[in-house]
């Protein structure tokens, strides 16, 4: 007969040793997961804009999965790339599906990325103490843009080739170092086999770096916790809800709708967002009539088109992105959410219109009549960040903010 030793009143009943308790003792992943993704306190008033981060994460994983399988059949050489893409579309089992999901996924990813960034601008999520969340997000955006650009080169169609060529031209306009830098990046004076190989490696490797930076982004967010539509920090437990089940369910619904949109795009409109010119193999001797990048790069391409000096165009185009890093310091208003800043809301609307206008100019840049509209839009873009953001606070009507997230009364 076995004898169970008597426990002193201050002793805990020993827990049954299971695999999970064994792991937990050595690497506390289960308790960390419970703390960060189950019990994690979220502001109770989050709206749909707060679901896009989760959508981005899911689409990113889908891009990675489809990308790895595509890479297994892709040939990264100037002579084989185009044919290997055709083979994926026609002969590889479900290759067409993988490619359609990867292409629709990239468009959806960039669309949600812009919405996610806009949410940050609208609700002031970049402000103290969330500056590092904003920074890591911007790094992600730069990395995603590099990856998307490299991906566009890989089919080695007409647009792939000529888009790479436009970038070389832009880089080589940098005084003193431009020519050398472009030559070094391309491995020659025009896009060639070496260029394609480099872009393939860049595209593949960046995807994993992006996943790493997403971890940093979310860790930064979990230290300072989420902002919310009212832009005031929750002070009591009643103003928050645990992440599980409330936001798991809410994010889940938005993810399902986003995936539905993805399959509708992939199955019914696989070529809607691509340029038909890219279904012709790259030909260095024949320039397409209208070289244009994917829609998500159009505003930046538009800037290159409306400035006569190539170098200045490049500076303003790259500067329009880098300017976003300074936003936490440029905005001096103590109020976070644009909900309580009517003047800033109008300014933000004008910013969106200018951005779209620049995109239209990028797409139809050969229509010379659009150039001045583009220049006006560009002027507003810079004025918004360098003048309106720092000084608008002086002209805003003073508002009394709600004191709690439970407060149903809106600010007057
Ligand atoms: C690969 C791209 C990205 C992924 C996967 C990602 C993921 C996430 C996730 C999961 C969240 C928490 C849920 C939410 O608030 O939506 C979040 C929050 C946030 N992200 Fe991103 N993000 C990305 C890019 C960006 C970019 C480009 C920016 C803007 C510069 C950004 C800025 C923010 C901010 C400010 C928050 C906190 C928002 C708040 O609490 O109000 N993120 N992100």
Image: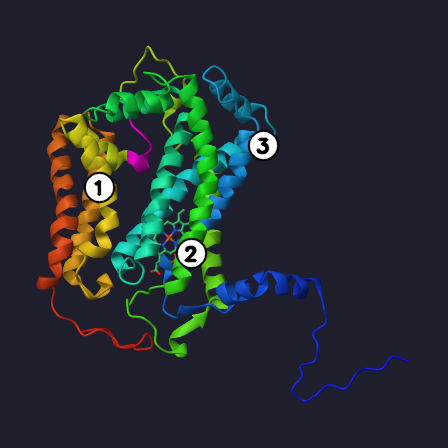
Question: Where does residue 356 sit, x and y in percent of width and height?
Answer: 23, 41
* Local crowd size for mark 3, using a 10 Å CA cut-off: few (<14), some (14–19), many (≥20): few
* Local crowd size for mark 1, using a 10 Å CA cut-off: few (<14), some (14–19), many (≥20): some
Task: Name the side, left or right, on which 199 lies relative to 399.
Answer: right
Residue most extreme to the left: 395
Who comes first in sequence, dot 1 or dot 3? 3
| Residue closer to the observer: 22 or 130 | 22
Give the residue at mark 1. 320
| Residue closer to the observer: 371 or 311 | 311
Magenta-colored stretch includes residue 295: yes
Give the residue at mark 3. 94
Up/down of 114 relative to 202, above or below:
below
Q: Residue at x 67, y 84 (%)?
A: 11
Give the residue at mark 2. 218
Give the Cα separation between the discs numbered 2 and 1: 25 Å
Please report the bounds of the magenta region as a residue range.
Answer: 291-297
Quarter of the figure with the C terminus: bottom left
Give the Cα separation between the discs numbered 1 and 3: 40 Å
């Amino acid at each position: 007969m076995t004898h169970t030793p008597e426990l002193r009143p201050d002793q805990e009943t020993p827990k049954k040793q299971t695999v999970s308790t064994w792991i937990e003792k050595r690497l506390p992943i289960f308790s960390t997961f419970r703390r960060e993704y189950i019990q994690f306190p979220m502001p109770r008033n989050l709206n749909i804009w707060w679901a896009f981060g989760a959508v981005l994460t899911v689409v990113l994983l889908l891009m990675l999965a489809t990308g790895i399988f595509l890479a297994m059949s892709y040939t990264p050489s100037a002579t084989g790339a185009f044919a290997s893409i055709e083979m994926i579309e026609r002969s590889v089992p479900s290759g067409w599906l993988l490619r359609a999901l990867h292409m629709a996924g990239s468009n959806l990813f960039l669309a949600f990325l812009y919405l996610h960034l806009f949410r940050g601008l609208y609700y002031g999520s970049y402000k103290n103490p969330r500056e590092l969340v904003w920074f890591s997000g911007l790094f992600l955006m730069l990395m995603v843009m590099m990856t998307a650009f490299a991906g566009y080169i890989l089919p080695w169609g007409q647009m792939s080739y000529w888009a790479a060529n436009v970038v070389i031209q832009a880089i080589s306009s940098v005084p003193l170092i431009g020519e050398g830098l472009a030559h070094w990046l391309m491995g020659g004076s025009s896009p060639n086999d070496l260029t394609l190989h480099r872009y393939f490696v860049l595209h593949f490797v960046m995807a994993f770096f992006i996943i790493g930076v997403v971890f940093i982004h979310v860790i930064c967010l979990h230290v300072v916790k989420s902002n919310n539509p009212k832009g005031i920090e929750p002070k009591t437990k009643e103003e928050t809800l645990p992440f599980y089940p409330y936001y798991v369910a809410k994010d889940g619904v938005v993810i399902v709708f986003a995936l539905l949109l993805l399959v509708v795009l992939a199955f019914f409109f696989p070529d809607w967002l691509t340029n038909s010119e890219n279904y012709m193999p790259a030909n260095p001797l024949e320039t397409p009539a209208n070289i244009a990048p994917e829609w998500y790069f159009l505003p930046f391409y538009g800037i290159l088109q409306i400035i006569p000096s190539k170098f200045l165009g490049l500076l303003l185009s790259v500067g329009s992105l880098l300017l976003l890093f300074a936003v936490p310091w440029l905005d001096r208003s103590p109020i976070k959410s644009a909900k309580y800043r009517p003047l800033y809301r109008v300014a933000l609307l004008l910013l969106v219109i200018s951005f779209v206008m620049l995109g239209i100019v990028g797409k139809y840049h050969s229509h010379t009549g659009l150039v001045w509209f583009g220049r006006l839009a560009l002027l507003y873009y810079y004025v918004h960040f360098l003048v309106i953001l720092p000084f608008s606070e002086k002209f805003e009507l003073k508002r009394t903010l709600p004191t709690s997230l439970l407060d149903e009364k809106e600010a007057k």
